Image (spheres, rainbow, N blue to C red):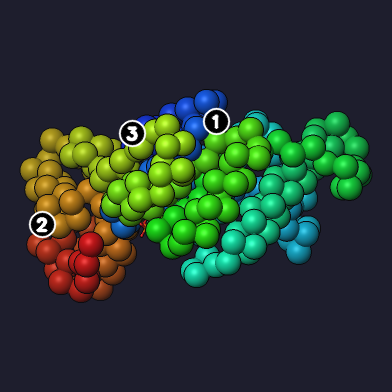
Amino acid sequence: MNDDFLITKEYRRFAEFCDACRQYRYIGVCHGRPGVGKTLSACYYSNWDTLQIIFNNKFRDKRETIEPGPGVADARSIFYTAPVAASSNRIEEGIRSARYDLSYALEWVKSVRNGEPDFDVLHLFDPTELIIVDEADRLKMAGLEQLRDIYDRGNLGLILIGMPGLEKRLARYPQLYSRVGFVHEYRALSTEELRFIMEHKWADLGLNFQPNDFTDTEAMTTIARITGGNFRLIQRLFTQIQRILEINNLHTITKEVVETARQSLIIGS
Ligand SMILES: Nc1ncnc2c1ncn2[C@@H]1O[C@H](COP(=O)(O)OP(=O)(O)OP(=O)(O)O)[C@@H](O)[C@H]1O
Ligand SMILES: [Mg+2]
């Protein structure tokens, strides 16, 4: 999944926000409309996909093929998706186990670097500096209390990710809210940035995006209008565009192709 991840300006803003919460050990709230890229950004920031392969013993063969880059060795964040209607015990347990997984993965990376095949799994140091909780809208009072307790007990930062309005809902819990240091809005892509994304999308289809070509610019403007710069919609629209190009044996993305692709999409955001 990370191979396809595009480093956008919004991602950089998000990463700075995470760095700040981690450095100052604050609680941060990140909100954004569905599909703008919050979950993917949080996974990418925390290197969660790679870490998961490492600590998941079931994928031992796959794990052995990993070349742990500096990003993984420097990972200090855990990514946790709040379950639907979870008890506070389940949340505590989920976060505890993710922290263990991070310790394990880092220890494994260290042992690979040092050429030592084994390490002591019973005495691991907990390196967690930041806990990122996705789907925080699902949390009820007890879950939020549990997180506040985890935050108060450890010297760490905590980020709650959710939909717009999350920050207002949290304001109803003064004890938690008084600890919130930053609120960050994850925005949709700007028009300039869309051009950069278009270049990638065109290239994915084996085409060359020409900003000076009227047809390409017109297609891009249509895509911008239809998707409003929403990553998920762009992704889905391009799946349809690819299908339409293939069916009709076309080699150019025109406004008409985009509009035909749009007809088979449900735009519900
Ligand atoms: N930086 C990125 N590079 C490439 N594709 C991306 C990027 N960000 C998002 N996407 C695409 O957009 C889709 C939606 O992203 P994501 O699931 O992170 O959104 P979200 O903001 O978490 O939405 P929700 O609020 O519904 O959970 C992804 O599945 C992916 O296809
Ligand atoms: Mg999400």
Q: Amino acid at mark 2?
A: Lys
**Other-residue count near label 2 (Cα within 10 Å), few / some / many at <14 / 14–19 / ≥20:** some
Q: Is residue 20 visible?
A: yes
Residue under pointer 2: 255
- Secondary structure under tag 2 reads helix
Q: Which residue is mark 1?
A: 25
For the point 41% across and 49% down, the residue is 173
* Amino acid of disc 3: Lys
Q: Is ligand 2 closer than 8 angstroms to the Cβ of mark 1?
A: no
Q: Mark 2 or mark 3: name the one nearer the start of the chain.
A: 3
SS at badge 3: helix
Helix, strand or loop under label 1: loop
Establish whether ligand 1 lies closer than 8 Å to the Cβ of label 2. Answer: no
Residue under the point 15% across and 57% down: 226
Q: CA distance from mark 2 to mark 3?
A: 26 Å
**As drawn, 236 above or below 104:** below
| Whole-number angstrom distance, CA of label 3 to CA of label 1 | 24 Å
Q: Sequence order check: which comes first, mark 1 or mark 2?
A: 1
Looking at the image, residue 32 sits to the left or right of residue 118; the answer is: left
Q: Is residue 147 left or right of residue 183?
A: right
